[in-house]
Image (tube, grey):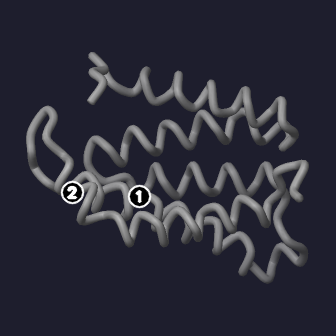
Amino acid sequence: MLHTLDAPAVRTWCQLALRALGQAREEIDALNVYPVPDGDTGTNLYLTVESAAAEVESRFADPAVGTAPGLADTVRAMARGALVGARGNSGVILAQWLRGTAETLAEGGGADQLRAALQRAADSAYQAVAEPVEG
């Protein structure tokens, strides 16, 4: 069992999140009704995570690095990739969520850091929207 979040775990999370969003994107697109039922939330989330996962993969594939990247580099790459590839409002909100996560997880991957990272992520996502509305 994983007791401390590390770079390979973040890499795996990105791959699993991309796969899950790929499978659910049409269903999520159909749920999208607020504020405008444009039917692309699942697609936008998928494309944003695809960009984040690609950036993470580039860190693991970089021969100049010589060794596998550490947690801080990996979570920063994930957040940067999401921001660069963010699509639509949902993608921008997700990118801010990942940025908030990365800011805390760059300091370590223990349970306390993960708990703080998730709280910071939620705060970052809410701050990314001028007038957040649940739904």
Other residues around mark 2 within 10 Å, as few (<14) / some (14–19) / many (≥20):
some
User: Where, quadrant-wise, is the C terminus in this rendering?
Assistant: top left
Above or below, 54 against 119 in this view is below
Q: Earlier in the sequence, mark 2 or mark 1?
A: 2
Q: Are marks 2 and 1 in contact (CB under 8 Å)?
A: no
Q: CA distance from mark 2 to mark 1?
A: 14 Å
Q: Mark 1: give few (<14), some (14-19) or many (20+) Cα within 10 Å.
A: many
Q: Quadrant of the N terminus?
A: bottom right
Under mark 1, the amino acid is Thr
Residue at position x 13%, y 41% from top?
33
Q: Which residue is mark 2?
A: 29
62 or 16, nearer to the observer: 16
The image shows residue 48, relative to residue 83, as above or below, that is: below
Which residue is tagged 1? 48
| Residue 119, image x, y percentages | 62, 25
- The three-letter code of the residue at mark 2 reads Asp
Q: Position of residue 11 (x, y in %)?
A: 69, 66
